Amino acid sequence: MTKAKAGARVLYWFRTDLRITDSPALNAALAIDHTAAFYPVWCWDPNYVYGHRVGLNRWSFLLESMTDLSDQLTKLNKKQKLHVVRGAPEKVLPMMWNSWGITHIVWEKDSNAYAKIRDERIKALAKDTGVEVLEVHGRHLFDPTEVVKANHNKPTMTLHQWQSVTGKMGGVDQPQPTPISLPDPGDVKLSDELGEERHKYEGVDRNAHIRTGSDTCFDKLSGSKGDYAVPTIAEMGFGQPTTSIRGGTTAGHEKLSNFLSHPDDVATFSKPRTAPTSLEPSTTLLSPYIKFGCVGVREIWWGCKEAIKKWDGKGGQETKEPENMFGQLEFRDMYAAAEAAEPDFERIRGNSVCRYIDWGLQNQYDKDGQEILPRPRGGDEDEERLAAWREGRTGFPWIDACMRQLKNEGWIHHLARHSVACFITRGQCYISWERGMEVFDEWLIDWDPASNPGNWMWLSCSAFFSQYYRVYGLVSWPQKTDKSGALVRKYCPELKNFSDKYIYAPHLAPESVQKEAKCIIGKDYPFPILDEHAEKDRCIARLKNAFALGLHGDAPEVLDGTAPDLLRKKHEETGALDVKTAKEMKEEKAMKKREAAGDSTLDGYVKKAKR
Ligand SMILES: Cc1cc2nc3c(=O)[nH]c(=O)nc-3n(C[C@H](O)[C@H](O)[C@H](O)COP(=O)(O)OP(=O)(O)OC[C@H]3O[C@@H](n4cnc5c(N)ncnc54)[C@H](O)[C@@H]3O)c2cc1C
């Protein structure tokens, strides 16, 4: 508890902690003695609005979550709300603390590389003006920076490692109580002394392609009505979202209590046994709420513990980590404690944990290490494959259905993420995980700066996982949990009349069947863009070489640009680029046989015809 002399004026800076329940930081702010004024604030930051790739579904989820939070604050005190101030935090926070006589600023700690740099700048500014800063951990089960310290400043690269480090750090804290009241805000007048400077943004606008109307969200410091309202999606110049997932702590708590009210499901939850093919999510769908901090992680953890205590022991065996719910939350923490130790976690170059593989369409950097933007065009085939994957028109219904669901809903099941990530990287396409990750960055509502790159590195066997020869079948894998292809029928309606036999491979259907299904492959739905098995074998051969070379993103050969040549030589030596599948070898053998019989050349044909 911090003691103020008299009349503390506290600014609580909400970020990705859009909740009042189970918030250690908010409780710490409310515990400051003699608070005369309390300001719940959100900085509407141009670096996020323009600099981060965010799709319409995530924007709408965020705005709904901010509105819901604001309502919760008003319920605690009619004079209170979330005050949205439009401008970069390092510009508008000092304006607020100077005008409102702020003595303390409090926020939930963020260990992410981008947030850390921004927060250090704010801390320095606050120090200069004598404002006391309180940064309180609460976003994860354990503070990732403390986990890294306890792990000898190394990232946690396996769940076992994370468990053994945190095992010595005490248990997971109990959830924090929900405040029952809030102090009043003081005067909220602010003059816009900085004008345009307040929201100046010089980088590339990464959301320009989804902006269809005029962007007025920064026109006035306190919003168009001067009431510090949550911006609307229209003010940002964006169209309407497509997701059915509603944002906010109220919706998040409904989901959580629904899950916890079935102790049987909680006790026997087993991630590998959930189905990526089901129309209704077979996992909790809590991730968007966890991402924006609408629901606290301690609440989930201890909620599950309590539910299991109530369980009657029937209906199956209690599951253990990593497959149970505790394991899921631990994976999230493991990635956070890996990201906290590696500043280049979101890219290959410079990334000490990421294996170097000569993927197509890797990020390119200039001699000062800056990424070259806009991106130079890569090989035609790679560009076409990436576009087909993104747009859900690869000709593989399972992949296309998952990608269309992702774009439409902003969420897909974990194992669906596995399938599409494996396909675009090591499974078939051999395209950099950086490019796949970016599509997820834009479309996932639950996008997280540690979990997204971490899982992409896992799936591409760049880090965390190395069994590159285990590849998800594009037909056999979804058939394991749904032979009838319900998800395909929903998201690829052009295929809905195919029978179960062809639903995951309509290109194999005879012409008469295609006609009957009113879907001609190559016209109404694409042919597969590649040969699944041939590409799989080629990828495995190349990955084998990359593993043998053993370079990581921070190796001198990667930094000086010689790594691709080294790997190309290895591929030439081992014939990795000419690897043939069993089917291709069979075809080749048959061709040779025909040639020997004088059957395949024009000469042979003429001779045969004459005979
Ligand atoms: C390529 C790829 C990218 C991913 N990107 C993200 C991302 O940006 N943000 C994100 O939250 N998850 C990401 N995941 C992890 C996982 O798919 C989602 O957390 C999960 O599907 C969310 O659904 P749920 O809430 O129903 O999960 P549940 O199975 O109900 O799990 C509960 C919670 O545990 C956490 N969790 C579970 N599995 C993981 C995991 N493997 N990694 C990290 N956290 C996990 C999530 O917070 C999740 O909400 C990614 C997975 C893959 C394969």
Image: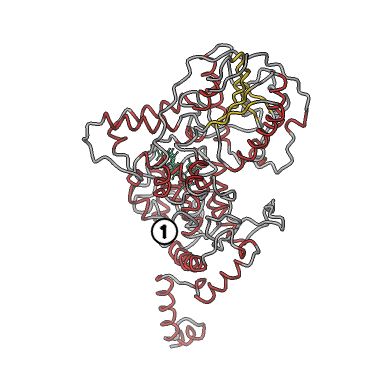
Instruction: Name the residue at the top extreme.
Output: 78
Which residue is rendered at x = 63% and y = 35% of the image?
119
Q: Is residue 592 visible?
A: yes
Question: Of helix, strand and loop, which one carries label 1?
Answer: loop
Q: Look at the picture and state if 541 lies above or below 485.
A: below
Q: Is residue 61 visible?
A: no
Where in the figure is residue 549, as x and y percent of width and height? 52, 68
Q: From the image, tell me which residue sits under label 1.
A: 471
Which residue is rendered at x = 64% and y = 24% of the image?
84
Give amino acid for label 1: Val
Q: Look at the picture and state if 347 lies above or below 36.
A: below
Where in the figure is residue 32, as x and y percent of width and height? 56, 20
Quadrant where the C terminus lies?
bottom left
Horizontal relation, residue 136 to residue 201: left or right = left
Which residue is rendered at x = 41% and y = 58% of the image?
471
Which residue is rendered at x = 48% and y = 60% of the image?
428
Nearest the eye: 272 or 481: 272
Horizontal relation, residue 191 to residue 489: left or right = right
Horizontal relation, residue 565 to residue 544: left or right = right
Nearest the eye: 33 or 450: 33
Nearest the eye: 139 or 272: 139
Nearest the eye: 376 or 370: 370
Where in the figure is residue 592, as x and y percent of width and height? 44, 82
